[in-house]
Amino acid sequence: MSDVSPRAVVLLSGGLDSTTVLAMAKDAGYDCYALSFDYGQRHNFELEAAAAIAAQASVTAHKTIRLDLGSIGGSALTDPDIEVPQAAQSDAGIPVTYVPARNTIFLSLALGWAEVLGAQDIFIGVNAVDYSGYPDCRPEYIAAFAKMANLATRAGVEGQQMTIHTPLIAMSKGEIIQAGAALGVDYALTVSCYAADEAGRACGRCDACRLRSAGFQQAGLPDPTRYLS
Amino acid sequence: MSDVSPRAVVLLSGGLDSTTVLAMAKDAGYDCYALSFDYGQRHNFELEAAAAIAAQASVTAHKTIRLDLGSIGGSALTDPDIEVPQAAQSDAGIPVTYVPARNTIFLSLALGWAEVLGAQDIFIGVNAVDYSGYPDCRPEYIAAFAKMANLATRAGVEGQQMTIHTPLIAMSKGEIIQAGAALGVDYALTVSCYAADEAGRACGRCDACRLRSAGFQQAGLPDPTRYLS
């Protein structure tokens, strides 16, 4: 083995979870390549947050791929005809904010970049606790993706194993925030709200805001989020 | 069951294989939604071919998603710094024209659209005979993708099964052409060459041209390809 750090592709949305994952990947000694998507999401301020977070984390590279998921439709996050709910949705099954096949699409593009970089590690901030309504956040899904990835790639054919790291998958929002804070994450840079204004100020009422706010309470840490009201 | 035809998403590159698959999906009674990608490929004339083919096949919808795979790099098909080989590559392992994770990325986006459409069928023209050097053309890869897809989606959670159809996977190029011709495919509309000119005229020398030309010979059918010289 050389002294060179292994490379990892880290999916970075600009939200609380992926920012924590980036800090964890850095702390684990990876040379980090952050990947963001401009996918027609309503909350484009997330991308500005991602750029600021990537810069502060001194990643080796940060790439933003433009991808028009809005043309596929089907989600409140990309389709202006579907309203983002303000009320909690705990009993409603899969939320309308679910973007069809989103994690599969993002992981596939991360896989392509990882292959070009010669990286065998991909980090993604999925969480099966707070987002149990999203099918593509479950451990069995991630395991199936990894198995497929190893059959899809040149590296897999040549015997290298691609690992999909999901360090947050079993953590509560409070635990995630505590872990990130211990690694020095500045959560004031992150944006979680589905309906923030152009300056990135959070609505304080949507599902994402409720989860985030409760997470800081659970963590026993001050909430640095800038709210609209 | 209703009289309504089941919907299928058909990946359509504008090449010989995917055009044959579209004819097969139509022949099998599917209501076809064709999906193409503008992914920074050198041969952009393929997209014009795809549009003409989709129109002639009277698909219900044809969508072209823009996706900058060139920014990831790593393939002669999207990276201007990598030369497309003119000589045959039969013993060279995975060809340089391989685009990292391409089929995974394309199938993932097809999966997203299928989920929005309520479709349970995706067609892709992968072939394990002529393209055995591409890891993501093998049956075991397709099976792993299907398994992952059923864990990734709302439909899968609700018990519906997504099927990835690969009708060409074990066919020779000659057999593909015979099957398509029997279904009325006009191969003059299709483009296979990696280095065609802006009018879609084929070089006649690259791997794709060699395979295609040999296919028409095997099929015992006249080759309608327009060659440069």
Image (tube, coloured by chain):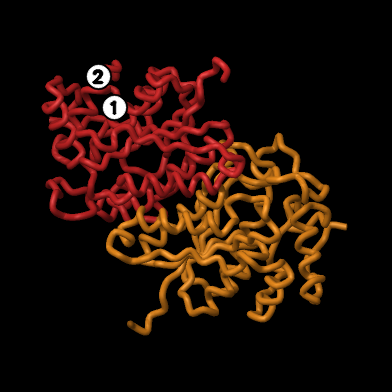
Chain colours: A red, B orange
Residue that numbered label 1 is attached to:
A190
Residue that numbered label 2 is attached to:
A181
The structure residue drawn at horizontal position 23% and vertical position 54%, both measured from the top left corner, is: A94
**Where's residue A188, x and y in %?**
25, 22
**Where's residue A43, x and y in %?**
31, 38
Using the rendered view, name the quadrant where residue B114 is placed. Answer: bottom left
The structure residue drawn at horizontal position 22% and vertical position 30%, both measured from the top left corner, is: A201
Residue B199 in sight in this render:
no
The structure residue drawn at horizontal position 20% and vertical position 28%, both measured from the top left corner, is: A175
Name the element at disc 2: helix
Vertical placement of residue A164 versus B138, above or below: above
Using the rendered view, name the quadrant where residue B84 is placed. Answer: top right
Dot 1 or dot 2, earlier in sequence: 2
Label 1 crowd (10 A; few <14 / some 14-19 / many >=20): many
> How many circles with numbers are drawn on the protein?
2
**Where's residue A75, x and y in %?**
30, 52
Using the rendered view, name the quadrant where residue A24 is placed. Answer: top left
In the image, taking residue A198 as reference, residue A86 lies left or right, namely left
> The C terminus of chain B is located in which quarter?
bottom right
Chain letter of the residue carrying label 2: A
Chain letter of the residue carrying label 1: A
Vertical placement of residue B220 versus A15, above or below: below
Vertical placement of residue B171 versus A81, above or below: below
Label 2 crowd (10 A; few <14 / some 14-19 / many >=20): some
Q: Front-most of B105 and A43? A: B105
**Where's residue A154, x and y in %?**
60, 42
Q: CA distance from mark 1 to mark 2?
A: 13 Å
- Mark 1 or 2, closer to the camera: 2
In the image, taking residue A144 as reference, residue B19 lies left or right, namely right
Say if labels 1 and 2 share a chain.
Answer: yes
Q: Front-most of A186 and A115? A: A115
